[in-house]
Image (cartoon, grey):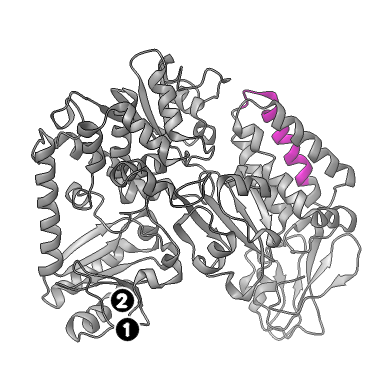
Amino acid sequence: MPVLKNINELEAVREKARAHKKDRENNKLSIILGMGTCGIAAGANEVAAAVREELDKFDLEAEIIHVGCIGMCHNEPLLDIQQPGGARITYTKVTPALVGKIFEKHLIKGEYSKRWIFGQIPGANGEIVEGLPTYDELPFYGKQVRIALRNCGLIDPENIEDYLASGGYGGLAKALFKMSPDDVIEEVKDSGLRGRGGAGFLTGLKWEFCRKAKGYPKYVICNADEGDPGAFMDRSVLEGDPHALLEGMIIAAYAIGAPEGYIYCRAEYPLAIERLKIAIRQAYEMGLMGKNILGSDFSFDLKIKEGAGAFVCGEETALIASIEGKRGEPRPRPPYPAVAGLWGKPTNVNNVKSYAITSQILTKGADWFSEIGTDKSPGTAVFALTGKIKNTGLIEVPMGISLREIIYDIGGGIPDKKEFKAVQTGGPLGGCLPVEALDTPVDFDSLTAAGATMGSGGMIVVDQETCMVEFARYFLTFASAESCGKCVPCRLGGQRLLEVLTRITSGDGTLEDLDEIERISKYMREGSLCALGQLTPGPVMASLRFFRAEYEAHVTEKFCEAGVCAGMFTYEIDADRCTGCGLCMKACPTKAIIGEKKVVHVIDQSQCIQCGACYDVCNLGAVLVKRKHELPVIEAAQGEGVI
């Protein structure tokens, strides 16, 4: 790779990269494979091997391109075919056995099977296949606006030329040669960008504080310690477009006056770390990082620090302590990191998405960004959409879109004809909102006012078969276990809340426990040192606020309506309905069901773990749910999902 010594050489390389990409699209057959963690987990490596075999079989020459996650995790593995001068056609849920059929039909016969095709991305000159929808015409993408995710799934993350061809490092060049550090900060401030790590503090203002703080050297840090259950926003950016993060960090370093930076990434993201290392090496080799970047007076070095999986290290002062080689524990603030951070020096800490958006603000302008979203929450929000929803995956939507649009238009609604019950936003420290809140706008202030939080971007949907008491207990189990133990309210309060929730879900709770939850939560919010302790009660308090009747039923009736809390019911087999077919026996993981074929079966309660497998497979309605506390048997029509 050439070492770029000035802005003209950068533009020449970018133009060459664009020309190479256009030549490839117009003259070569391209096979594009989704090789993010989600794709690999679904079998993309096996599909890639099958692609190579089938190309040899059909004697076809093609360029195989590996890309990151494009967002459709529910449709992985993905295989795209782009013929010379044509559109990029996306095939979903591809298996190795299916590759040959797709190639024969598409490449040999020139036919398209809508059975396997999701849609198409227009070619370099706008070419499309008549009769096939474009991504923008489909609900999953139609309402999205991709800024942080603009290149994910579209470029090869291990090829810097692909990033340059998409306009990469243009924002950095503009900052270095056309703007002063103060100009950069003002542009980011004017855009209204708020930190995408959860707190929502104005990014430009944070940069300004750090620039004005006394002390040298200064540092920039990327918080990529994504630890929320069900969250994979930052991981997907790191795997799919690592140079977007690097460019944003270099711009921030220039604005602040920082010669050095760190990416703090959890070690459980091996693919993300591998691609980051490749991107950093490429940036150094091209003179986009290191001494006198692009021949300017600005120099910047970047290192990766791998975290050991402590959730509390997502808090910026705990993260800084970990980089310093200390135990990852938060410290009191002030002073804030912008004044006294890494090794006591002024330090700017932002999330992956915040940095990834920055270059686009410089390239397209603050006004462009501020016109997207709402007045107080400009731009877009990235969510990992998971749970009981048809289209699980990664989405980027304009701020102000409603929860209903995300869940039903983009997410496709609730599967298996079941009913929506709640949505948890903000991860394990967030809050759940009921069906009455579906029209709430998704932005920092509206979600907080509704009783939830934006957080860093986790969004978990649950249906009618979810017990909200157990749901809250699950998140509390995670949050309390992740407490660093430094402050008493968090260390003891979380454990005490977990004891109360466990008692309620076991059928031993009292009405006084509901008051105890509120009392402990109050002291945790007021007395905990950092956001982990302050927000740990969030899911519990939100579920108690919106689903109090469920809590009271657990306490007064000793019954879990959703049939989840095992301590409140047992499964029994109705002798009048059971035909001895054996389906329940085969489904039982603990062999708790006894009986001969065509003879009424019996459940051994000492072996039953209340998993519900027998209930799910019985198509005769012979498996009944009995209240454990000497109350009448409750029957449920099979398939209705309500006990």
Q: Which of marks 1 and 2 is nearer the N terminus?
A: 2
* Residue 265 seen in the current view: no
Per the image, is 486 magenta? Answer: yes
* Residue 460 seen in the current view: yes
Q: Looking at the image, which residue is at 20% across and 49% down?
A: 159
User: Could you tell me how many numbered marks the image carries?
Assistant: 2
Which residue type does callout 1 highlight? Gly
User: What residue sits right under mark 1 in the picture?
Assistant: 131
Which stretch appears magenta? 485-502
Residues at badges 1 and 2 in contact (C-beta under 8 Å)? no
Disc 2 crowd rating (10 Å Cα; few below 14, some 14-19, many 20+) is few
Quarter of the image for the C terminus: give it. Answer: bottom right
Instruction: Give the side of residue 613 with respect to residue 556, left or right.
Output: left
Q: Position of residue 127 (x, y in %)?
A: 22, 74
- Badge 2 marks a residue whose secondary structure is helix
- Badge 1 marks a residue whose secondary structure is loop
User: What residue sits right under mark 2 in the picture?
Assistant: 97
Quarter of the image for the N terminus: give it. Answer: top left
From this view, report whether residue 567 is shown above or below residue 235.
Answer: below
Which residue type does callout 2 highlight? Ala
From this view, report whether residue 166 is shown above or below residue 533.
Answer: below
Query: Foreground: 598 or 413?
Result: 413
